Image (cartoon, helix red, strand yellow):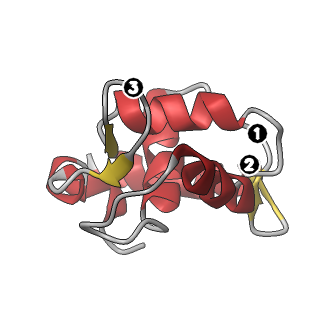
């Protein structure tokens, strides 16, 4: 698996332009890698308003679909949120859950 992830990391570099994700990957492993890079921008144990989450995402991507990335960060459990979307926070265990993907980054 480590070999596969290393290959996906290498392929993912083609999706970046000027340090920003230029295109959202189709393949799940590459998505997880891209989302983990974005998730690392959030401070642990801090709550964020939706507007703050959007700003962090905008700084990380070069395409306009902030909502897609925010939704995927939630669905893949990088971020938790209140039911009404008024607050977001980094999930405590996402690094353990995706440890193989973020190792050596």
Tell me the residue that label 2 is attached to: 15
Q: Earlier in the sequence, mark 1 or mark 3?
A: 1
Badge 2 marks a residue whose secondary structure is helix
82 vs 59, nearest the viewer: 82
Tell me the residue that label 3 is attached to: 84
Badge 1 marks a residue whose secondary structure is loop
Tell me the residue that label 1 is attached to: 23
Up the image or down, 95 lies above or below 32; here it is below
Quarter where residue 60 is shown: bottom right
Q: Residue at x 82, y 50 (%)?
A: 62
Q: CA distance from mark 1 to mark 3?
A: 28 Å
Q: CA distance from mark 2 to mark 3?
A: 32 Å
96 vs 88, nearest the viewer: 88
Q: Earlier in the sequence, mark 2 or mark 3?
A: 2
Q: Quadrant of the N terminus?
A: top left
Q: Say if mark 2 contacts mark 1, CB within 8 Å.
A: yes
Q: Quadrant of the C terminus?
A: bottom left
């Amino acid at each position: 698996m480590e070999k596969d992830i290393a290959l996906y990391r290498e392929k993912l570099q083609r999706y970046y332009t000027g340090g920003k994700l230029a295109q959202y990957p189709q393949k799940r492993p590459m998505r997880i890698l891209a989302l983990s890079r974005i998730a690392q921008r959030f401070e642990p144990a801090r709550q964020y308003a939706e507007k703050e989450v959007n700003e962090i995402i905008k700084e990380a991507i070069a395409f306009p679909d902030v909502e897609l990335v925010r939704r995927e960060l939630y669905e893949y459990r990088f971020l938790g949120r209140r039911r009404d979307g008024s607050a977001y926070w980094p999930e405590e265990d996402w690094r353990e859950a995706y440890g193989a993907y973020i190792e050596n980054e």
